Image (cartoon, grey):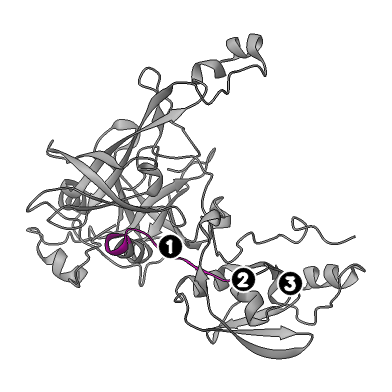
């Protein structure tokens, strides 16, 4: 009997290396009559200018100097600096289906499985609220894709009370990044920082609109770096997250995570259901890269290889080699083993085979499937990607030309 994907700890990344859907949204939706702040899943940036203006130049346009950690009120100073650039985003979408009223136990007692699912059911309006922040003085705004999902226009409200109609320029469910354009002039912008040199234990400040409470400031520390999508519980995303214990709640999604100097280092995105002090943010470098592509092209093309992988260790190696139904044996004790090559994909065209153990991608050593994912994500579609594999004890270097990820997988 073959080893099931679950037994192998299957890295469901199709390299892909991600995909997109299925986690509880901080942009909670509710009916006009009955609120429901957990519409889809438990999920809870930056200057993405389309010009070549560096983040430093944008931040220099701020009237105030950066807060100093030597200042005992540095959190208040950071919030005062960035707060005006943090916005509330209200999105509406029409859905057709069974009213949530019928989900009440009282009705379930009578209707059981006879609830109507007729496509002719009338549409109803769902509304959601999230956060975002202004990237440029002419109105570029960044938020999470799940905040504006299903909406072409949104309402953007500034901290000073001004309200704008926002045009959703593009969304990328693979990384959960979206960008919105509002028509404004001389708008406050959030200065961008960097995750270079970021370490666990450093200060972290979150600003957003949790549960409809506009411009709420919370503070804590960076708890960990490089949390994988699988660890966070959203394995279909192509992101390695910043973990923080700064309080993040429904409605914080899309808001900025700041360092002690009041610079944006991430975009608050996810929380772990049932946990306390476990919030996650997309690193600003990832958000900026995706946002730039969205502003330029309206979409993001993610490189795709077409393989499924599993992290290899001595125990896994032994289990594979002991399985009589396996048509190969593994010599290596570590690396990333290919357990499936999808038909008609770049990986198949390049000669990658089931049982290959990936050691390097673009001459960078990889130890986990996440490492492979990171290298593929930064590659270019159509440009040869060198993949070094160990095949039955022999080292081979193959050239794979990634294609655009199929829409069905996004």
Count of residue discs: 3
User: On the image, numbered disc 2 is attached to which residue?
Assistant: 345
Residue 407 disc label? none
Tag 1 secondary structure = loop
Q: Residue 181, image x and y in percent?
A: 21, 50
- Provide residue 90's location: percent of width, then percent of height: 28, 36
Which sits earlier in the primary sequence, circle 1 or circle 3? 1
Disc 1 to disc 2: CB gap under 8 Å? no
383 over 47 or under it: above or below: below
Q: Residue at x 12, y 55 (%)?
A: 138
Q: Nearer the viewer, residue 289 or 260?
A: 289
Range of residues picked out in magenta: 294-305
- Residues at badges 3 and 2 in contact (C-beta under 8 Å)? no
Is residue 83 part of the magenta span, yes or no?
A: no
Whole-number angstrom distance, CA of label 1 to CA of label 3: 27 Å
Q: Which residue is mark 1?
A: 200
Task: Give the structural element (helix, strand or loop) at label 3.
Answer: loop
């Amino acid at each position: 009997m073959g080893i099931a994907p679950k037994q192998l700890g299957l890295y469901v990344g199709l390299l892909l290396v991600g995909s997109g859907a299925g986690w509880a949204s901080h942009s909670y939706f509710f009916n006009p009559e009955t609120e429901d702040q957990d519409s889809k899943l438990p999920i809870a940036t930056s200057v993405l200018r389309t010009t070549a203006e560096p983040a430093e130049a944008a931040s220099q346009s701020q009237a105030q100097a950066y807060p100093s950690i030597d200042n005992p009120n540095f959190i208040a100073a950071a919030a005062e600096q960035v707060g005006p650039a943090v916005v509330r985003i209200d999105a509406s979408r029409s859905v057709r289906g069974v009213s949530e009223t019928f989900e009440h136990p009282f009705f379930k007692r009578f209707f059981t499985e006879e609830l109507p699912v007729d496509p002719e059911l009338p549409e109803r309006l769902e509304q959601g609220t999230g956060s975002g922040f202004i990237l440029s003085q002419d109105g570029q705004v960044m938020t999470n894709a799940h905040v504006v999902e299903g909406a072409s226009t949104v309402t953007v409200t500034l901290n000073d009370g001004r309200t704008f109609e926002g045009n959703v320029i593009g969304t990328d469910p693979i990384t959960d990044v979206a960008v919105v354009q509002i028509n404004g002039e001389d708008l406050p912008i959030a200065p961008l920082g960097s995750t270079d040199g970021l370490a666990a234990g450093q200060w972290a400040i979150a600003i957003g609109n949790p549960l409809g409470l506009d411009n709420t400031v919370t503070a804590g520390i960076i708890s960990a770096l490089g949390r994988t999508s699988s660890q966070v519980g959203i394995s279909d995303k192509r992101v390695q997250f910043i973990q923080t214990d700064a309080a993040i709640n429904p409605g914080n999604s899309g808001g900025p995570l700041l360092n002690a100097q009041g610079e944006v280092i991430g975009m608050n995105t996810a929380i772990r259901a049932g946990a306390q002090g476990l919030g996650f943010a997309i690193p600003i470098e990832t958000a900026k890269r995706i946002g730039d592509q969205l502003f330029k092209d309206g979409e993001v093309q993610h490189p795709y290889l077409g393989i499924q992988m599993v992290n290899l260790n001595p125990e896994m190696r032994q289990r594979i080699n002991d399985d009589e139904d396996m048509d190969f044996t593994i010599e290596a004790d570590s690396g990333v083993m290919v357990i499936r090559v999808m038909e008609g994909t770049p990986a198949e065209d390049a000669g990658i085979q089931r049982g290959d153990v990936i050691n390097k991608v673009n001459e960078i050593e990889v130890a986990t499937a996440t490492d492979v994912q990171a290298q593929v994500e930064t590659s270019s579609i159509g440009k040869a990607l060198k993949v070094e594999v160990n095949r039955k004890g022999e080292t081979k270097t193959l050239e794979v030309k990634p294609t655009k990820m199929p829409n069905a997988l996004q």
